[in-house]
Image (cartoon, rainbow, N blue to C red):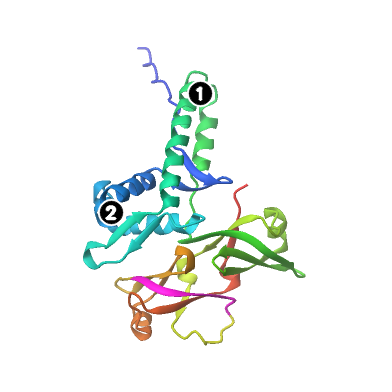
Amino acid sequence: MSASKPKPLEVTGQVWLDRKGHNFLGGYRIELLEAIERTGTLTQAAKAIGLSYKAAWDAVDAMNNLAEKPLVARAVGGRSGGRSTLTEHGRRAVALYRLLETGWRQLLTRMQSRIDDTQGLTDLLRAITVRTSARNELRGTVKIVRKGAVNADVVLDVGEGLEVFASITNEAVEELELRPGRTAFALIKSSFVMLTVDQTLRISARNRLCGVVSSVTVGAVNSEVKLALAGGRILTAIVTNEAVRELALTEGSPCCALVKASHVLIGVND
């Protein structure tokens, strides 16, 4: 009995809008932005594309953090989620994405008829969509690189007067080719973010990013606290429920995020 003929392999993939290779916009995120534009609320937009409200909120935070300017403007409004609208920058980003997607589809169609190394193409497409487990990704420009005997201090300008300090090895500086003016990303795990309402508190943590609490999600033991920074940036922290009570953290209350420089990872995309 002869073996059945295998089905032909297809060239597939998904386009991501990026700058210098770092993906931040594509797939369901574009659908979410378009739904926000249609419905005017994050709640209805999430429902329209089959996404939970929290997942939609997190997606908007991620996009706003990685964009030069916020893509979505939100006005919090209780259980209904308030009004959400695309900024002009957001509308241009969606239009550019759809233009790129059209060209991408045309390219895949041509490649489908000529593909020889399907596995090689698959690996390439997977590499394009690599993600990181760090909840906080802040895009910026390297401002200062100061090398020491073993480690180096790197200062990243993330806009609106905000700076992020990182302490990394000299070897990492060389491998990432970090230099003033180079685009880079600060990656910070939410569990590494400490919160305080005392803006005069003196502490050894190099990073002090102040803003207002945009949301508090209470869990069984820990709470997720989102802090709205200047320029529409959102920083997420995971702290104990006891800390939330002691600091009286509520939506709209002023708060500062404290992060040790050694807890900040620096990434580049080329």
- The total of numbered circles placed on residues is 2
Q: Which mark is residue 40?
A: 2
- Find numbered disc 1 in the image and state the secondary structure of the residue it sits on: helix
Looking at the picture, tell me which residue is in the foreground, 99 or 182: 99
Q: What range is drawn magenta here?
A: 205-215
Image marks 1 and 2: residues in contact by CB distance under 8 Å = no
Q: Is residue 120 above or below residue 201?
A: above
Looking at the picture, tell me which residue is in the foreground, 223 or 236: 236
Q: Is residue 91 above or below residue 180?
A: above
The residue under label 1 is which amino acid type?
Answer: Met
Q: Find out whether residue 209 is within the magenta segment.
A: yes
Residue at the image position 57 percent from the left and 78 percent from the top: 205
Residue at which label 1 appears: 111
Q: Is residue 220 above or below residue 39?
A: below
Q: Is residue 166 left or right of residue 217?
A: right
Q: Is residue 138 left or right of residue 247?
A: right
Residue at the image position 51 percent from the left and 27 percent from the top: 118
The residue under label 2 is which amino acid type?
Answer: Gly
Marks 1 and 2, Cα distance to the nearest angstrom? 39 Å
Task: Kindly give the residue lying farthest to the right in the view shown.
Answer: 149
- Find numbered disc 2 in the image and state the secondary structure of the residue it sits on: loop
Q: Find out whether residue 131 is within the magenta segment.
A: no
Label 1 CA crowd tier, 10 Å (few <14, some 14–19, many 20+)? some
Q: Is residue 183 above or below residue 77?
A: above
